[in-house]
């Protein structure tokens, strides 16, 4: 989900994203370390930008960007190694992870859309079948509901239930011909 300014109020896990941080990530496409030597801002700009970081207990914020659009952020707190701070190597590793994560998020979204399209095609075929005969209107829906209920009662896995439901929707498809 795109983390635009309108989404700042949306709760993410246990913290709210600071609007200034979101704006920075969207505009600069640049990681934030809660150390002004990294950001090179005026003291006032740095304090305004990082005011929300304390509530998140974040020390490093890395944008997740796909096609130049901010789709998320990785926030990290203190390093567990005593007295150690994030360095350029840490940032590069997390930024690489963020790039891979951006592609995974986009792929998952596309896969989900493809699955929705598949279900819409099945429903359209089922509707075509029922439109040929007024007697069968609602029949595929009823068969699908019963098949789903039986599959759930049999405690089948999600994949098996999906196959059964899709098959039930298309069980009379041969009648189209």
Image (cartoon, rainbow, N blue to C red):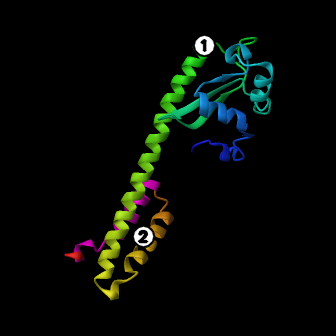
**Cα gap from disc 1 to disc 2, whole angstroms:** 56 Å
The residue located at (59%, 37%) in the rendering is: 72
| Residue 157 seen anywhere in this rendered image of the structure | no
The answer to whether residue 118 shows anywhere in this view is yes
Residue 150 screen position, x and y as percent: 46, 69
Query: Along the line of sight, which residue is nearer the eye, 151 or 70?
Result: 70
* Rendered image quadrant of residue 80: top right
For the view shown, which residue lies furthest in the left direction?
177
Instruction: Reply yes or no: does residue 34 show up in magenta.
Output: no
In the image, is residue 96 above or below residue 69? above
Q: Quadrant of the N terminus?
A: top right
Q: Quadrant of the C terminus?
A: bottom left
Left or right, 104 with respect to 15, comes to left
Asked which secondary structure carries label 2, the reply is helix
Residue 140: x, y in percent? 37, 76
Quadrant in the rendering for residue 25: top right
Q: Position of residue 111 (x, y in %)?
A: 41, 47
Closer to the N terminus: mark 1 or mark 2?
1
Q: Is residue 120 above or below residue 26?
A: below
Q: Position of residue 56 (x, y in %)?
A: 75, 32
**First to last magenta residue range:** 158-175
Q: Residues within 10 Å of mark 1 (few under 14, many from 20)?
A: few
Which mark is in front, 1 or 2? 1
Please give left or right for residue 119 compared with residue 177 in the image. Answer: right
The reply to whether the C-beta atoms of the residues labelled 1 and 2 are less than 8 Å apart is: no
Q: Which mark is residue 33?
A: none
Q: Is the residue 26 above or below the residue 127 in the image?
A: above
Disc number for residue 88: 1
Report whether 45 appears left or right of 26. right
Which residue matches tag 2? 147
């Amino acid at each position: 989900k795109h983390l635009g300014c309108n989404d700042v109020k949306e709760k993410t896990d246990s913290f709210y994203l600071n609007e200034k941080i979101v704006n920075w990530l969207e505009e600069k496409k640049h990681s934030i370390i809660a150390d002004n030597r990294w950001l090179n801002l005026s003291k006032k700009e740095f304090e305004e930008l990082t005011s929300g970081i304390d509530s998140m207990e974040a020390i490093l914020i890395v944008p997740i960007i796909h096609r130049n659009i901010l789709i998320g952020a990785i926030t990290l707190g203190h390093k567990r190694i005593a007295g150690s701070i994030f360095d350029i190597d840490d940032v590069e590793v997390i930024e690489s992870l963020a790039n891979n994560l951006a592609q995974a998020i986009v792929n998952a979204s596309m896969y989900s859309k493809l699955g929705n399209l598949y279900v819409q095609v099945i429903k359209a075929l089922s509707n075509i079948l029922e439109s040929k005969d007024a007697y069968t209107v609602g029949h595929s829906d009823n068969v699908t509901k019963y098949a789903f209920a039986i599959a759930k009662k049999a405690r089948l896995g999600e994949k098996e239930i999906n196959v059964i439901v899709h098959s039930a929707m298309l069980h009379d498809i041969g009648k189209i011909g």
